Image (cartoon, grey):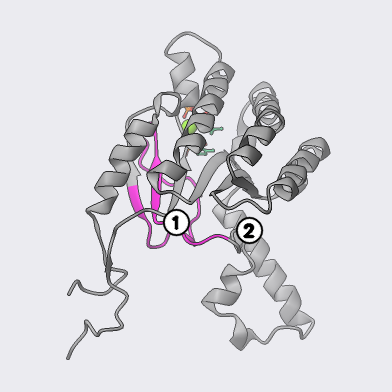
Amino acid sequence: MAFASASAPVVPARQAGHVAIIMDGNGRWAQMRGWPRLVGHRKGAERVKEIVRAAPDLGISWLTLYAFSTENWKRSTEEVLGLMAIFARYIQREAEGMAREGVRMRFIGDRSRLDPKLQRLMAGIEAKTAHLTRLNLTVAINYGGRDEILRAVRAIACEAADGRLDPADVTDAAFSARLDTAQLPDPDLVIRTSGETRTSNFLPWQAAYAEYEFTETLWPDFSPAELGAILARFGNRERRFGGVLK
Ligand code: IPE
Ligand code: IPE
Ligand code: MG
């Protein structure tokens, strides 16, 4: 029996076209210095700017960043409001620069719980950058993989109950099309900073066959040079997708 047929989806990894990052460790970075956690988040936002700028030259065309999870509401009101202010400021301050550099910005996550003013800023920059193609930047705000899957399941259940969708047509592609990430390819590589080796509800469906890299570096210390080194390692990995290498 020939398991490795010519059509088997076995490809050696080359470039990570879609990199997703769990940006973790801002709080510890600040606390280690005796500073408030929000100082770490502000430093983290500076790192985002730098990584976004470096990504296209590293061969990345899709970059997805985990900024706020559905579980992060458990934090103090001061930290949550501080983070929301950082997101709003980032969008306002970076809009021009991103447009100049060809960055298309999208958001995933449940927006309905966010401040309407922030929601407007998000929709505004999505519209303003919709024609750009150099880098597809997606920021996950109030994102949780289980929440995203449940919202898709509810949508599918409603369509089926109304007779608009035949249950037999609920395929992999049909399900993916109802996720927040409908317009995104699956991530090739997921990176988590700060030494934690868990996924914390980030892209559970989409990252089923992603490669993972965990680094001890805290997000405010993460650099384009370290990203480059991680990408070089990725290039040497064998991705089998359940097949066998020829
Ligand atoms: C990541 O840094 C940013 C968010 C989750 C919003 P943390 O704030 O989780 O930093 P640590 O993990 O407490 O150091
Ligand atoms: C994951 O980090 C979420 C983001 C980076 C936005 P957390 O710090 O919230 O995750 P846990 O609590 O350590 O799992
Ligand atoms: Mg954390």
Q: Which residues are magenta?
A: 184-212
- Disc 2: CA contacts within 10 A as few (<14), some (14-19) or many (>=20): some
Instruction: Return the mark for residue 161.
Output: none
- Asked if marks 2 and 1 touch (Cβ < 8 Å), the reply is no
Q: Give the quarter of the figure containing the N terminus.
A: bottom left
**Separation (CA) of disc 2 from disc 1:** 14 Å
Label 1 near ligand 2 (CB < 8 Å): no
Instruction: Return the mark for residue 180.
Output: 2
Q: Nearer the viewer, residue 30 or 147?
A: 30
Q: Secondary structure at mark 2?
A: loop
Residue 70 visible in image = no
User: Is residue 209 highlighted in magenta?
Assistant: yes
- What amino acid is found at the position of numbered circle 2 in the picture? Asp
Q: Residue at x 63, y 46 (%)?
A: 105
- Disc 1: CA contacts within 10 A as few (<14), some (14-19) or many (>=20): many
| Rendered image quadrant of residue 58 | top left
The residue identified by callout 1 is: 187
Residue 60 in the image: state x and y as whole percent. 43, 48
Label 2 near ligand 2 (CB < 8 Å): no
User: Is residue 161 highlighted in magenta?
Assistant: no
Residue 85 in the image: state x and y as whole percent. 70, 26
Q: Which secondary structure is most common in the magenta stretch?
A: loop
| Rendered image quadrant of residue 176 | bottom right
Residue 103 visible in image = yes
Residue with the most extreme top position: 34
Q: Residue at x 29, y 59 (%)?
A: 13
